[in-house]
Amino acid sequence: MLRIDGYTRLCGLIGNPVEHTVSPVIHNTLAQMEGRNLVYVPFHVEEGQIKKAVEGAYALNILGMNVTVPYKREVINCLDEIDGIAGKIGAVNTLVRTSQGYKGYNTDATGLYRAMCSEGIKIEGEEILVLGAGGAARAAAFLCVLKGALKVYILNRTKERAQMVAEEVNGQCKTECVEGMGIDGYKNLPEDKKYLAIQATSVGLFPHTQEAVISDKGFYRRVHTGFDLIYRPSCTKFMKLVREAGGRSYHGLKMLLYQGIEAYELWNGISVSQKDALLVYAKMKEAMGIEE
Ligand code: ATR
């Protein structure tokens, strides 16, 4: 039974749209499992209202917020403080209440890292292909560099955007290991080398389940592991093509799980065990109608 009383703490999600989010399942399940008096609610915030929304949340004693599209950059102007990695990435998806205001974090990146670790995927010393140059790709490229990748190639339909992101990551991280290319830039890479590929474009997202950003088998022969940030559908065309070429592939639902778990941990000052994380994961899959 859901308990709401005068001691109930509130957390939530700010975005537009927020109607299809699975995040309430993550946080409300965790709170219930822990017996914590906390509820998590999505808030649909209209364009131009983000500052008021954050100030209002603070005034209402709200413990923490997640932030989603389209406010992950804009919300930075509404913070009292920003975590180092989130500041480098230039995007915030989690607000943690402090005595002065909110501190911003990026648990998309750390959640992706935790998801990859849980699947046994290594970043350190690896050569990595990041597909896309939007917000998700930027966070993935930063993470790869911060976790010691040897080389990161950003491949994007709009080559200039890939080059801009590469330049920015190199500049922020004082490295030269990131290179931006057009989407077929892989053709210039050695054919006998295998890479980890992170799919961070929106191509293949439901309902366009038969699309992949690259369909050339020559690309997939170069991939030992494919990680798609998309989780709807749970097996994307990109994942199928990686498997057909003999590689392993994963969808992005564990990234979603761990970005939520990391936020919950920050809000409540606790660590969630691996066992509990997997129980939450099962609840998410159930809520989304995913079987495997
Ligand atoms: P997000 O912030 O969620 O990553 P985004 O900023 O809209 O979203 O970025 C979407 C990414 O998918 C971009 O890299 C985009 O390529 P462009 O920079 O060339 O626009 C990529 N993308 C979207 N549709 C695509 C398509 N049909 N073919 C190839 N790439 C596509």
Image (cartoon, grey):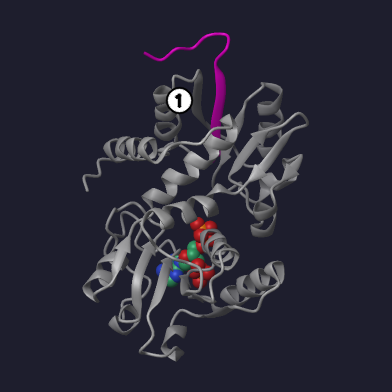
* Residue occupying image coordinates x 45% and y 25%: 31
Instruction: Classify the position of the N terminus by image quarter.
Output: top left
The reply, left or right, for residue 260 in relation to residue 287 is right
Amino acid at pointer 1 = Ala
- SS category of the residue bearing label 1: helix
**Residue 3 drawn in magenta:** yes
Foreground pick, 122 / 217: 122
The reply, left or right, for residue 173 in relation to residue 228 is right
Residue 17 in view here: no
Q: Position of residue 18 (x, y in %)?
A: 48, 38
Vertical placement of residue 122 versus 214, above or below: above
Q: Position of residue 152 (x, y in %)?
A: 53, 75
Disc 1: which residue: 31
Residue 235 in view here: yes
Quadrant position of residue 160: bottom right
Magenta residue span: 1-15
Foreground pick, 273 / 67: 273
**Residue 35 drawn in magenta:** no
